[in-house]
Image (cartoon, rainbow, N blue to C red):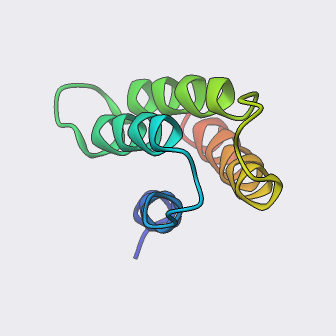
Amino acid sequence: MDKLENIIQMLEDIINDRTVPKNVRSEIEDAINTLKSNKFERIVKINTAISILDEISTDSNIPMYARTQIWNILLLMEQLSKEKK
């Protein structure tokens, strides 16, 4: 499993957590769909998903443990984006 697939799996784990607000799960689903899309280059997909997740991480309704997971995923994605430049 490559790093991007691992990130998608981590995001899917958050979506399956019913304590995470529905609007946040919806935004995470948008990020996953972007990462799985064949319409854009890999770096564009990663940067778009980073933008979506960064905005989600400021939502005051998200549980702290889920916010921490999102921050960890953001860190992994930023490292991945730098690898591919």
Q: Is residue 64 found left or right of 59 in the rendered image?
A: right
Q: Residue at x 82, y 53 (%)?
A: 64
Residue 60 located left or right of residue 78: right
Identify which residue is drawn at 45% across, 58% down: 15
In the rendered view, tell whether residue 6 sits above or below residue 23. Answer: below
- Residue lying furthest left in this view? 38
- For the image shown, how many numbered marks are present on the structure? 0
Depth check, front residue: 82 or 29: 29
Judging depth in this view, the residue of 2 and 62 nearest the camera is 62
Image point (17%, 36%), residue name: 38
Above or below, 54 relative to 26 = above
Give left or right: position of 59 versus 37: right
Instruction: Please identify the quadrant where the N terminus is shown.
Output: bottom left
Location of residue 17 with respect to 71 vertically, above or below: below
The x and y percentages for residue 8 are 43, 58
Q: Give the image location of residue 57, x and y in percent.
A: 72, 35
Q: Residue at x 79, y 61 (%)?
A: 65
Residue 51 locus on image (x, y percent)? 58, 23
Is 22 in front, or is 52?
Answer: 22
Identity of the residue furthest to the bottom in this view:
1
- Compare residues 75 and 65 and report the one nearer the observer: 65
User: In which quadrant will I find the C terminus?
Assistant: top right
